[in-house]
Image (cartoon, rainbow, N blue to C red):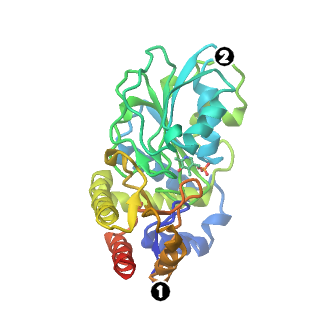
């Protein structure tokens, strides 16, 4: 039975990708061996790694000024690696606090240099993206989280500044075009919109490196991985392969421009269903900040006792992963690239039927 997978992450990938991955797990390209049992220095895997890098460059328009790396340790390791590699001990970085992931990035960076939290929406439980704050010119970088997976907010335009931006794009990379030149570094854990858990994409401006004095352990120095082309040690072979397949799928389906259009259609349908329904309300206070990837919503005030019944209705209709994160409550519909609009239609119909039943 087809499931409509609204899980926030690990999350939905294209069905064809799962099929190709299953085949490669058993017999890669007819060589009689699984992709999991051959050398990461084999011509087979070298070709996969190269194609994955080319696809990243091609889809996002990444020039040779940047390195494209596939690392381990999740986006969570990037919280400290970015600061360790880019923030001089005597320097200062600016951070915008838009959710739990931003807060974790701030905490980790504080060990390496000056961290100035330029704005925060924490007091309002992260229900909007702060705007109109000053960004000092002398910052080493400005760190933002472009999509707040837990709180359902997303930057629709970048902060206005000449300061290079470092961004956690874990949950909206490849969902729309990116103005790469504005960034010194972009990182993303794969498991939201790019592939399975186990690999982290890093796009880094090569010139931004080598400006800090501290000792950086070899594995945590981006220059190690640039020099060894993401194969200093054994890279996560299978997650890189599945990410490559997903990027092929993005390209075959029109690239990030087509993804943006497809995601906007799904988000419009979803948010209209929330706004038009008396039984539900969105959690994000400024509609302009609503995420196209993760729609967060609650039951109307006084109707919260219907929560379990609604989740059951979702389950019966094969809608998976709709329960909200504990720090927001309610519900969350994650609608990453691979989700078809038909799945959103199914969920919005459940919401309508549910409201009629409980009118
Ligand atoms: C999921 C998520 C993370 C954490 O990623 P890990 O790969 O589990 O470390 C960080 N930032 C954002 C925006 C996320 O959605």
The residue tagged 2 is: 213
Q: Is residue 250 left or right of residue 27?
A: left
Residue 226 pos. (x, y %): 57, 35
Disc 2 secondary structure class: loop
Give me the disc on residue 235: none
In the image, residue 19 sits, relative to residue 181, either above or below, namely below
Residue 337 appears in the picture as rendered: no
In the image, residue 106 sits, relative to residue 324, either above or below, namely above
Residue pictured at 34% horizontal, 57% vertical: 251
Residue 198's quadrant in the figure?
A: bottom right
Residue 4 pos. (x, y %): 44, 75
Question: Quarter holding the C terminus?
Answer: bottom left
Q: Is residue 38 left or right of residue 267?
A: right
Q: CA distance from mark 1 to mark 2?
A: 57 Å
Camera-nearest label, 1 or 2: 1
Q: Is residue 66 left or right of residue 24?
A: left
Disc 1 secondary structure class: loop
Give me the disc on residue 1: 1
Q: Which numbered disc, 1 or 2, marks the residue that appears first in the sequence? A: 1
Residue 9 pos. (x, y %): 54, 60
In the image, residue 229 sits, relative to residue 263, either above or below, namely above
Residue 214 appears in the picture as rendered: yes
Residue 240 pos. (x, y %): 55, 55
Residue pictured at 29% horizontal, 62% vertical: 272
User: Which of these two is toward me, 209 or 5?
Assistant: 5
In the image, residue 54 sits, relative to residue 350, either above or below, namely above
- Taking the view exactly as shown, the residue that stands out farthest to the bottom is 1
Residue 326's quadrant in the figure?
A: bottom right
User: Which of these two is toward me, 123 or 228?
Assistant: 123
Residue pictured at 63% horizontal, 52% vertical: 41
Residue pictured at 56% horizontal, 58% vertical: 325
């Amino acid at each position: 039975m087809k499931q409509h997978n609204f899980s926030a992450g690990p999350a939905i990938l294209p069905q064809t990708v799962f099929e190709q991955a299953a085949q490669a797990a058993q017999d890669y390209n007819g060589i009689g061996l699984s992709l999991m049992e051959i050398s990461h220095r084999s011509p087979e895997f070298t070709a996969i790694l190269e194609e994955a890098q080319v696809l990243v460059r091609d889809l996002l328009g990444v020039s040779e000024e940047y390195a494209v790396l596939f690392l381990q340790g999740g986006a969570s390791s990037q919280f400290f690696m970015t600061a360790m590699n880019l923030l001089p001990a005597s320097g200062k970085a600016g951070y915008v606090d838009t959710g739990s992931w931003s807060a974790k990035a701030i905490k980790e960076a504080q060990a390496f240099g000056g961290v100035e939290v330029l704005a925060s929406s924490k007091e309002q439980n992260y229900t909007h993206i702060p705007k109109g704050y000053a960004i000092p010119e002398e910052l080493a970088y400005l760190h933002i989280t472009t999509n707040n997976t837990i709180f359902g907010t997303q930057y629709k335009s970048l902060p206005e500044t000449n300061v290079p931006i470092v961004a956690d794009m874990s949950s909206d990379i490849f969902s729309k075009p990116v103005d790469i030149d504005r960034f010194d570094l972009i990182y993303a854990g794969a498991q939201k919109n790019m592939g399975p858990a186990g690999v982290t994409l890093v796009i880094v401006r090569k010139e931004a490196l080598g400006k800090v004095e501290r000792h950086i352990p070899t594995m945590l120095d981006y220059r190690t991985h640039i020099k060894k082309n993401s194969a200093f040690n054994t890279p996560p072979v299978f997650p890189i392969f599945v990410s490559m397949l997903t990027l092929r799928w993005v390209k075959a389906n029109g690239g990030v421009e087509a993804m943006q259009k497809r995601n906007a259609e799904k988000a419009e349908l979803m948010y209209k269903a929330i706004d038009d329904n008396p039984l539900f309300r969105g959690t994000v206070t400024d509609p302009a900040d609503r995420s196209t990837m993760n729609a967060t919503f609650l039951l109307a005030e006084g109707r919260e006792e219907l929560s379990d019944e609604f989740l059951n209705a979702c389950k019966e209709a094969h809608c998976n992963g709709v329960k909200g994160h504990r720090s927001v409550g309610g519900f969350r519909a994650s609608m990453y690239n691979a989700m078809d609009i038909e799945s959103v239609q199914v969920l919005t119909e459940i919401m309508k039927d549910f409201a009629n039943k409980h009118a």
